[in-house]
Amino acid sequence: MRASWTWGAGVDSNAAMKTSLYALAALTAISIPHIALADDHLDAAATALTSDTIAYDFVEGITTEVGPRQAGTEAEKRGRDWAVAWLKANGFANVADEPFEMPTWVPGKNPSAEIVSPFPQPFVIAPLGNSVSTEPEGITAEVVEFGNVAELRAAPDGSLAGKIAYISHSMTPTQDGSQYGFAGPARWVGAGIAAGKGAVATVIKSVGTDYHRNPHTGGTSFRGVEATPAGALSLPDAANLERMFDRANGQPITMKLVLTPRDLGVTTSGNVVGEIVGRDPALPPVLLACHLDSWWNGTGAFDDGAGCGIVAAAAKHASRDGQPLRTIRVLFAGAEEVGLFGSIEYSKAHLDEPIAVALESDFGADRIWRFESNFRDTNPDLHAKIAASIARFGVADSSIVATGGADINIARDQKTAIIDLQQDGTRYFDLHHTPDDTLDKIDPVQLRQNVAVWTEVARILANEPGAIKP
Amino acid sequence: MRASWTWGAGVDSNAAMKTSLYALAALTAISIPHIALADDHLDAAATALTSDTIAYDFVEGITTEVGPRQAGTEAEKRGRDWAVAWLKANGFANVADEPFEMPTWVPGKNPSAEIVSPFPQPFVIAPLGNSVSTEPEGITAEVVEFGNVAELRAAPDGSLAGKIAYISHSMTPTQDGSQYGFAGPARWVGAGIAAGKGAVATVIKSVGTDYHRNPHTGGTSFRGVEATPAGALSLPDAANLERMFDRANGQPITMKLVLTPRDLGVTTSGNVVGEIVGRDPALPPVLLACHLDSWWNGTGAFDDGAGCGIVAAAAKHASRDGQPLRTIRVLFAGAEEVGLFGSIEYSKAHLDEPIAVALESDFGADRIWRFESNFRDTNPDLHAKIAASIARFGVADSSIVATGGADINIARDQKTAIIDLQQDGTRYFDLHHTPDDTLDKIDPVQLRQNVAVWTEVARILANEPGAIKP
């Protein structure tokens, strides 16, 4: 038997086929390596590439049987219960739900943003995390447009009194996701800046790259100012609003905004953990992380059900050929979206238990294209060994120093080894934080490539006798 | 100067570029003819191909300044007022809004469909036209799945008492739109059949080909039975529901459905008309039709703002080189979506005023690929002349007999000449009757190809001295 990795092969459904073709189109000019292995035996990673079902089973299961998992709510709790049962059913040891307390925000229902004049029509909006509610009758006010956060910052103090600020930044797809750093501030800090200048509410163009009527939510921060209502328009609605400015001949654009978020006070979230126990429990474990919570509007497939499926599947496959030397621990963090509470709590609770190395999967389910570590200089042999072992899956080595994802605060706090297995983010911001984050967006072929790469990396790390980051 | 028609050239924005690339991908293996013309002069159609702005201006204007135009509502009235003003501003004569009365249904707000057990989570749903409302507390009932309308018809009488029927037909994209005939009955008659067997409500998989959380609405019929609540799930939600059946091990799937449509009774709609007056007003005119109303959930860009923009632009361009022999009349029909009221009323009002030929544009804004008439046998020279004149735009001749679109009842009632300029429908049912029917989905390059073809056809017809269909 021979495992060859070709895009679009083995796709399971019409939806996935469409997704796969879409991904293929997005990834033009990628040359796909064939995997040369002995015909009579595929190693664990190659087996994962051709036939893994564990990751898909996880993400199909949690999106179907649980659905959205807003942090701190009963839905997240159902997600944790589901994950605990799944880990046990899949042979993980020491499975636990480690609870912690957190302040919980919920979005409310039926948000609306309606242009009142001069061109009355309804827009589609989603509240941003930490937005407060409007009164039930809503806020009706003139909208003032800013091209980006810098323009908003330049507005005179008090100049937005009684106004709704609108930020019309633009974002383009990038393979490495770097445009999130460019466009993200409109969401992260825009509403707080506008509130500081007197705005009664802020509306942003979604931080996203799709063209569907599905707004992108996400957290916003009101550091030092009183929170106001804040929401994101879908990209088509934002474009429509901008055309209204062009066509209004200076008439004011008036919007009626109704948002109904509320704070539930302190509730319980939790981190779910499980282990493939190693032969030498005295050696620090390998930590594979993801997060289990999602925003309320999608089903948390790309963000981050897939990540949890990938790390769990890799932990299983990496021990296929025998118990690994080190324990492989999976961490399904809670309450990531709303402020990394799970990651912070996990580090607090386990700071004095050294880990060997940590990795996180939280950027969708499209293929891994680049490998980064923070021990390339200090442990060049191990870095090179990993790079060489995953080159067959089309993953390039990199000299970029890995800094790790949101859920592995513990690795940064312990200053230990970190690996980043960078996923292709070209279509990530089409789906991120939207209602469209659903199972059909996952391309099973690319998902299996993720599992294969993680399997290989986890297998090498879990069988490494020496310190990973000397 | 030389006009060459290449896909993707001249695209105006990121959104349109993405759309254009999407269209390009959907239209693989199409060979694009170059247009050979004298370098020093482009005829009216070729000019339209390279530089028409009229059609885009129309659809941008009405989607931005009016937005959704649900039949019989004040929004449709604003749409008619806008169109009347636009036609006058663009030099049309005899512009009028011809009112008629109709029964008006409105969708209400905040529909919801929530799985109560065994896997609680919210779904995205839209009411179908003619659905009645649930009580405010909703209907909570077991969902029973049928694979298609035939399976539903086979269910024993009374067997759905107290149940919600769910129809899980599937639909694939087709260039000629023919899958609408295959999948459409689930929406057109499914709810009525289910109601006849005792169902308390019907939920269908959207009749659509996309994978976004945007349900496809559209009319349903309860002929002979008392209407029930009826709605369409988005495709991802429908897929999720079907996975629930697979995973529930026979446990009942219970859904809570809240729909709030209502009938407004009889209100006023209208047909907007305008003319490019011909040199011989005694000759029957050429009728170019589209519809102005839209469903409430999108902005009526593809369906059918584009169609009205195309026919209006063509009427203008066709008279660029001099007053045509015959009058070209444009008909922007009202209330098409909810039952072709405008088309029926127009025929009733004008049945004794012969028209020469009628054409309708109501299948989006993607390229025209095929020409059909109902006078190929009776007026072969004219048919051949038209076919030859639009071949340069990549439009193929066909022996299929044109039957005309929804808005030209008058042509069928008068048994006169009809032409169908078939548009590429490959992505039409990604957008049809959804919130996603917005301006950014229109590819300006393909829109201009439509205008060019219509210009050429309208020019030939309007200057034809003899009977079009002898």
Image (cartoon, coloured by chain):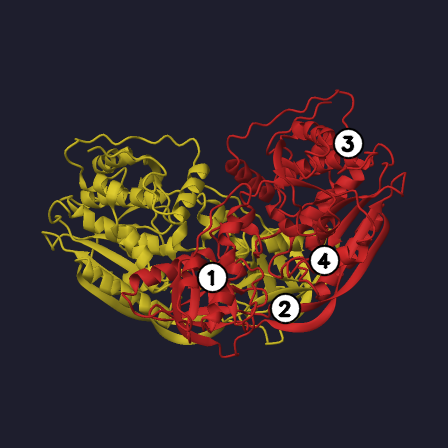
Chain colours: A yellow, B red
Q: Nearer the viewer, residue A250 or B444?
A: B444
N-terminal-most mark, 2 or 3: 3
Query: Are the numbered discs 2 and 3 placed on the same chain, yes or no?
Result: yes
How crowded is the residue under tag 3: few (<14 C-alpha within 10 Å), some, or many (20+)? many
N-terminal-most mark, 3 or 1: 3
Which SS class for mark 3?
Answer: helix
Q: How many marks?
A: 4
Of badges 4 and 2, the one in the foreground is 4
Quadrant of the image containing the N terminus of chain A: top left
The chain holding disc 4 is B
Circle 3: residue type = Ala
Q: Which residue is mark 1?
A: B204
The answer to whether residue A249 is seen in the rendering is no
Q: Could you give the CA–CA distance between mark 2 and mark 3, rounded to whole angstroms?
A: 42 Å
How crowded is the residue under tag 4: few (<14 C-alpha within 10 Å), some, or many (20+)? some
Q: Position of B185 compared to A463: left or right?
A: right
Of badges 1 and 2, the one in the foreground is 1
Which SS class for mark 2?
Answer: strand
Quadrant of the image containing the C terminus of chain A: top left
Which SS class for mark 4?
Answer: helix
Of badges 3 and 1, the one in the foreground is 1
Q: Position of residue B278 (x, y in %)?
A: 87, 40
Q: Which residue is mark 3?
A: B44
Q: Position of A404 compared to B168: left or right?
A: left
The chain holding disc 2 is B
The answer to whether residue A231 is seen in the rendering is yes
Q: Which residue is mark 2?
A: B106
Circle 1: residue type = Ile
Q: Which residue is mark 4?
A: B344
